[in-house]
Amino acid sequence: MSKRFLRRADVLEMLASYGDRRPDEVSEELGSLELTWLVAQVEQRYSVLLDLTDDEFAAMSTVTGALGRLRATLGQPAVDPPPDVSIVDGSGAGGG
């Protein structure tokens, strides 16, 4: 099963949908409600249950921190692949 790679733009779009904003209006700093919304959106999009510890939540106080932690939790590489690459079966290989 192919899973779309989680990109910063995806995170900004998900956060923007909370509060009916444009992605460029999303602050780097995340509030607790925004973070809860983001986790729920990622769980829904990737069909996973994210069991995050308090320390992991604390590391997600910014968009950058949340992106890194979510990628790690989803088993995705820390850096963006080329735009047309998807993650296939968690192997990190695939085509778009």
Image: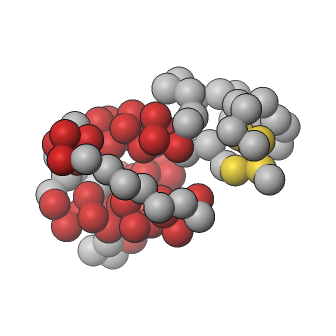
Seen as rendered, the residue at the extreme bottom is 20
In which image quadrant can residue 95 be found?
A: top right
Residue 26 on image: x %, y % = 28, 55
Q: Which residue is drawn at 69% across and 39% down?
A: 90
Depicted 58 relative to depicted 79: above or below: below
Left or right for 84, reference 28: right
Left or right for 2, reference 44: right
Which quarter of the image is occupied by the C terminus?
Answer: top right
Q: Residue at x 40, y 67 (%)?
A: 40
Colouring scheme applied when the structure was drawn: secondary structure
Residue 59 on image: x %, y % = 22, 37
Q: Which residue is drawn at 18% across and 47% down?
A: 54
Q: Is residue 82 visible?
A: yes
Residue 66 on image: x %, y % = 32, 43
Depicted 50 relative to depicted 53: above or below: below
Depicted 38 relative to depicted 77: above or below: below
Seen as rendered, the residue at the extreme top is 79
Depicted 4 relative to depicted 44: above or below: above
Q: Residue at x 27, y 64 (%)?
A: 36
Left or right for 28, reference 50: left
